[in-house]
Image: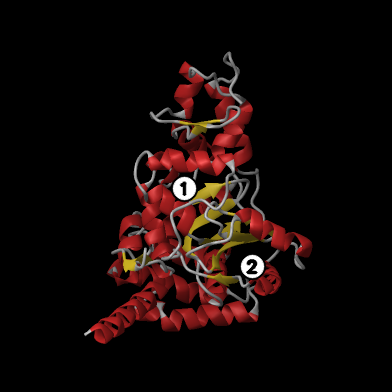
């Protein structure tokens, strides 16, 4: 809640952000978050209904946490595990438990980067999301698409402020466009091709850039994140009884310096502000990779273990660094064209080949390793991604429908 008088300096804010961004040393923990749509999607169940159905089945067998995105997307977050294989298996086991709990109610879990039939409306009355949507609606519809119709695979890897953490910080940003392109799976928006292979990433690129562009800047990730956060626009002020969406741009740094008619920010406001920032690589005491479209089983497994191998296996990281030097800035091209872009295709093929060779050494499970190999053969080696399958299916369906209408 804002304070009537100044209570936070820019230096104190910067120090607080630095302290919480990354620890001093880099560990080997891995975590995974996957977001599922619930169907039928044209009339999705509310978050309150889904919670009520699942509550009797908690805790889940492998301890994953259930949360909900504003459009009703169901997110499963694993505990921190020692290997990527353990994290994948934990989420897979808990996904099975959730499926079993939902099935008697006629609800299924489906996977895609975007649900092409989901309405652009909230499935919750939570003030955070109501105010967030109002903030984004002031610019365009991309925010509503992002909030209500998108789903992702988030891969979380340990990183610190030491040399190993700095390397992971830089490399996570550098491989980001390649991962967008290789796992693009959202070409259909509101039942028609959007012109993007990853429409989900396209939506992120179209919202407030102060909170969605990459945060890489300078040598120290803690300094980079502090500067990013202070220069990002304030989304809303948390007041009672309702939050106040910001209608005019106000950076957090300006709020500290100049205040607002509703007050000055506190340390609590700063901590909350950090939760409203969504760069493709976000430091949260670890690195959260947010650029991968959600995919059906077993392909989400491939995304998890390949991304982990690229960042955590020394030999593979060296290959990935060299392979993605000339694609590090191609976020737009990756979302638009996927692996049809020749440079992204070449970098993906090199990265996947190296990652697959390292999977046993980083503790990948057999099913996920097999999925990664199959994914390479079916998609990456062919310069394709799951979005191409969706477009071919849409085209065949449209042709069939048109034929019946003749």
Residue visible at 59% across and 77% down? 368
Which residue position holds label 2?
84
What is the C-alpha distance between the residues marked 1 and 2?
A: 23 Å
Image coords of residue 147 (percent x, y): 48, 51
Q: Secondary structure at mark 2?
A: helix
Image coords of residue 373 (percent x, y): 51, 81
Classify residue 200 by image quadrant. bottom left
Q: Is residue 208 left or right of residue 286?
A: left
Res 324 visible? yes
Query: Which numbered tag is attached to residue 279?
Result: 1
Looking at this rendering, what residue extends furthest in the front direction?
A: 405
Q: Secondary structure at mark 1?
A: loop
**Of the two numbered discs 1 and 2 in the rendering, the one whose residue sits closer to the viewer:** 1
Image coords of residue 83 (percent x, y): 67, 67
Camera-side residue of 342 and 103: 103
Res 275 visible? no
């Amino acid at each position: 809640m804002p304070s009537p008088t100044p209570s936070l300096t820019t230096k104190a804010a910067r120090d607080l952000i630095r302290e919480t961004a990354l620890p001093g040393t880099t560990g080997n923990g891995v975590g995974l978050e996957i977001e599922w749509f619930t169907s039928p999607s044209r009339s999705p169940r509310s978050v309150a209904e889904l919670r009520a159905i699942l509550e009797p089945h908690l805790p889940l067998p492998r301890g994953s946490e259930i949360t909900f995105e504003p459009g009703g997307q169901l997110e499963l977050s694993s505990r921190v595990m020692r290997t990527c294989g353990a994290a994948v298996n934990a989420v897979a086991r808990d996904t099975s438990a959730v499926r079993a709990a939902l099935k008697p109610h006629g609800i299924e879990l489906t996977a895609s980067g975007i649900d092409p039939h989901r309405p652009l409306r909230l499935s919750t009355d939570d003030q955070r999301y109501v105010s967030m949507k109002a903030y984004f609606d002031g610019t365009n519809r991309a925010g509503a698409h992002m909030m209500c119709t998108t789903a992702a695979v988030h891969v979380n890897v340990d990183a610190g402020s030491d040399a190993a953490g700095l390397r992971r910080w830089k490399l996570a940003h550098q491989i980001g466009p390649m991962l967008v392109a290789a796992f693009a799976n959202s070409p259909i928006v509101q039942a028609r091709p959007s012109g993007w292979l990853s429409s989900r990433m396209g939506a992120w690129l179209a919202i407030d850039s102060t909170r969605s562009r990459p945060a890489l800047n300078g040598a120290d990730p803690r300094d980079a994140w502090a500067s990013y956060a202070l220069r990002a626009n304030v989304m809303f002020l948390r007041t009672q009884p309702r939050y106040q969406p910001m209608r005019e741009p106000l950076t957090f740094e300006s709020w500290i310096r100049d205040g607002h008619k509703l007050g000055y920010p506190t340390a609590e406001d700063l901590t909350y502000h950090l939760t409203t920032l969504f760069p493709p690589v976000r430091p949260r005491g670890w690195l959260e990779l947010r650029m991968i479209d959600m995919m059906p089983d077993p392909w989400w497994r491939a995304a998890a273990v390949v991304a982990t191998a690229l960042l955590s296996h020394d030999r593979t990281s060296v290959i990935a660094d060299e392979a993605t030097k000339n694609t590090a800035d191609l976020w737009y091209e990756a979302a638009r064209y996927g692996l049809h872009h020749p440079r992204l295709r070449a970098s993906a093929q090199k990265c996947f080949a190296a990652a697959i060779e390292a999977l046993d050494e980083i503790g990948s499970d057999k099913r996920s390793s097999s999925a990664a190999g199959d994914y390479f053969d079916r998609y990456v080696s062919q310069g394709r991604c799951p979005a191409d399958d969706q477009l071919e299916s849409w085209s065949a369906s449209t042709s069939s429908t048109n034929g019946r209408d003749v």
